[in-house]
Each structure stands twice: as C-alpha cells, then as structure tokens.
Image (tube, rainbow, N blue to C red):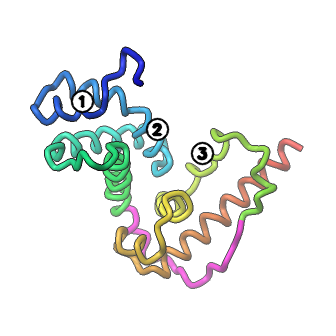
Amino acid sequence: MHPPHRIAEDELIRQCKSGSLKYQELLYKQFYGYAMGISLRYCQNRDDAMEVVNDAFIKLFKSIDSIDTEKPFKAWLRTIVVNTAIDRRRKDIKLLQNTDLDEAGHLTIGISAIEDLLADDIINMMQSLPPIQLAIFNLFEIDGYNHDEIGEMLKIPASSSRVYLSRAKEKLRKVITEEKQKHG
C-alpha cells in the first residue's frame, strides 16, 4: 500500500494519458529519484544526469500512450533513461572511435579492494571514468548487456566495447588502490 501522499502508478499513468499536466508533474516527482539514480550511473556529473532525466521524462510523456500497462512502469522508465543517456554519449563515442584500441588487455578488480567503500565512493569513482567507459561499464556490469548488444546500441564494434570495459576496470582499479593507500 502506498503512503497517502503517493498515488498509485496505474492512476498516474491513466491521468497522464488523458493529458493532465498535474499528474505529469506528480509522476515526475514520484519517480524523479529513481530516474536520477539510474542517470547518475551514466553521466559524468549531476548536471548532465539531471538533463538526461528531464529529457527522458519528455520522451516518456510524448510516448505515454504506448506504455504496456501489463509490464512494470519502472522497467519502461529505466529503459527510457538508459537510452537517453546513451543517446547523449553517442557524440562523445564518435569522437573517440579513432583511438587505438588494440593495446588493452583483460583486467579485473579485486572484490576485497571495494569491500570497505561506501556506495557514494564507488559512484564518485565511476564518474571519474571517461563517458564511453562509464557507459560501457554500466551497460555490461550493471545492466547485464553483452558486448554484441552494447556494440549495436552504441554503434561500435563489440571488440571496442571489450576494450573500453577493460580500460574502465583498469582505471577503477587504480582509483581504488589510490583510495586504499590514502586511508590506510
């Protein structure tokens, strides 16, 4: 049961489909935090994340009539936020495609290195990654896409996805090692 100040998803969606600006605002407020949490994983900073969230909600409201009410709303919103973040990064990716990708190897991050870190520390470390690496790390490690799917989404070869993921992990490993040395 929802707390009194929250409105059921199906009611919000129904009212948004009818064009109610009031309910669009309520839907936005109710799911802003959820969308922002997703967006922050893909963006370099909070301002970029906020732009992605706002763009995602604009897309959501334009296509609200096509929502499948048999499927969870959050899954639909999540897909829109992720795709909006990726769309923003495609420009950066095109600029980086000329980078020499042959030099990367297979790297891993030790679990013991991150045991003592807080979620905010990990998010801050992730945001230190270049945009392409951040997007691919999220898509592969957090969202569960494979390299072929990532390549298709970002319009890059699957092998490039593997290399960027490897570089992201190497950079995170270095940042984690530096943090561990600072704190003990």
**In the displayed structure, does residue 68 sit left or right of residue 37?**
left
Q: Which three-letter amino acid code belongs to the residue tagged 3? A: Ile
* 136 vs 23, nearest the viewer: 23
- Disc 3 or disc 2, which is closer to the eye? 3
* 139 vs 101, nearest the viewer: 139
Q: What stretch is highlighted in magenta?
A: 92-108
Quadrant holding the N terminus: top left
**Label whose residue precedes the other's in the sequence (2 or 1):** 1
> Which residue is tagged 2?
46
- Disc 1 or disc 3, which is closer to the eye? 1
Q: Which three-letter amino acid code belongs to the residue tagged 2? A: Arg
Give the main secondary structure of the magenta stretch: loop
What is the secondary structure assignment of the residue under circle 1? helix
Q: Position of residue 10 (x, y in %)?
A: 25, 34
> Which residue is tagged 1?
12
State how far apart marks 2 and 1 are (Cα). Answer: 27 Å
Q: Where is residue 7 in the image (x, y as percent from the top left)?
A: 31, 23
